[in-house]
Amino acid sequence: MFPRLTKNGIGYVQSPLLAQCDFLAHAFCTRLGGTSRDDYQSLNMSFREGDEEFHVLANWDKLSAAFEIPLENFLVLNQVHADGIFVIPPHGDFYNSCDPLNYDAMVTRRENLAICIKTADCVPVFIVDKMKKIIAAVHAGWRGTASGITAKVVRMMVRQFGSLPSDLLAAIGPSIGPCCYEVDGQTARAFEHVPHARTFFAPAKRRDRLMLNLPEANRLQILDLGVPQDNIETSGWCTTCHPDVFFSHRGSGGITGRQINFLMIQGAPPCRALFVNDAVGSVH
């Protein structure tokens, strides 16, 4: 199970595997450490769920201060439960701020950009090329998982960026677990074409339902593409079983907040000019 940590009042869990990469900053945040109230207590990071805007803004400020990442360096997608991947170039402009980022995954080698996934039961997946320093963040709900979004990201990293599967690390964060994710026949049928589907479904108590193991379904997508088993970690946290720690859409009946999960390549701080007695020097 990923260990629980606290940084300047913000609760989060972290992958021990990714924590070994000294060029990374990452956190699968909990719901703890914010200012929101009632159903959104306390670190709700989404403006779209009905929470007061000033609480969400304050939560983003707290996260930024806790991890010492400027607020403008966090990038959040407009997640649409599909399989689109947003590729961010290492330098220069990369999107028009007037257009929504309707994607469910991001890939980049850009430094000091925290790529974010919002969750409240869906699976956040982080993938890292430890040699080429390329990172990806994936939002995998049942629709994205059924369409193979995590496998699609791994294939893109291999084909477009030249990553070797043996160099990839993957961390599958907190999500609804197989203990709590009961689905109907229509949802199950969406996985009929997916390899190993029988291994991540189990009978439910109700005869017309099945229990779906979303973390395992995504783990197998990564494993099937040649990433070594020892390079893949699963958090062990079920968001529905731990409502005191995580937001859970299913566990709350649909009215709840969203936790943020972020991954960032740490770069050198920008160089600033220092003027002393009309001379120009530089400090870092």
Image: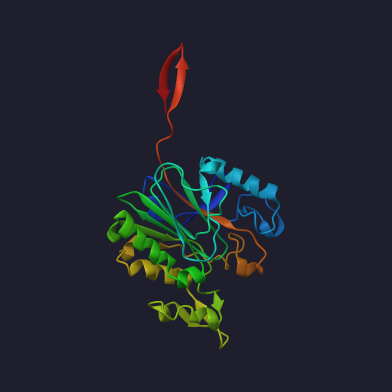
Q: On the rendered image, what quadrant is the C terminus found in? A: top left
Residue in the image at 66% along x and 70% along y: 253
Q: Nearer the viewer, residue 49 or 42?
A: 49
Which corner quadrant of the image does residue 217 belong to? bottom left
Provide residue 79's location: percent of width, then percent of height.
54, 60
Task: Examine the image and state in which quarter residue 16 appears.
Answer: bottom left
Q: Residue at x 48, y 68 (%)?
A: 144
Q: Which of 220 and 93 is in front in this view?
A: 93
The structure residue drawn at horizontal position 46% and vertical position 17%, both measured from the top left corner, is 275
112 shown above or below 15: above
Q: Find the residue positioned furthest to the bottom.
A: 207
Is any part of residue 30 visible from this angle?
A: no
Number of dots carrying numbers: 0
List x then y, in percent, for residue 3. Answer: 47, 56
Q: Where is residue 259 in the image (x, y as percent from the top left)?
A: 57, 56
x, y percentage for residue 91? 40, 42
Quarter holding the N terminus is bottom left
Q: Quadrant of residue 186?
A: bottom right
**Residue at 53 percent of width and 40 percent of height:** 70
Left/right of residue 22 with respect to residue 115 in the rendered view: left
Q: Which residue lies furthest to the top in this view?
A: 277
> Would residue 63 be seen by someone viewing this image from the given angle?
yes
Q: How is the image coloured?
A: rainbow
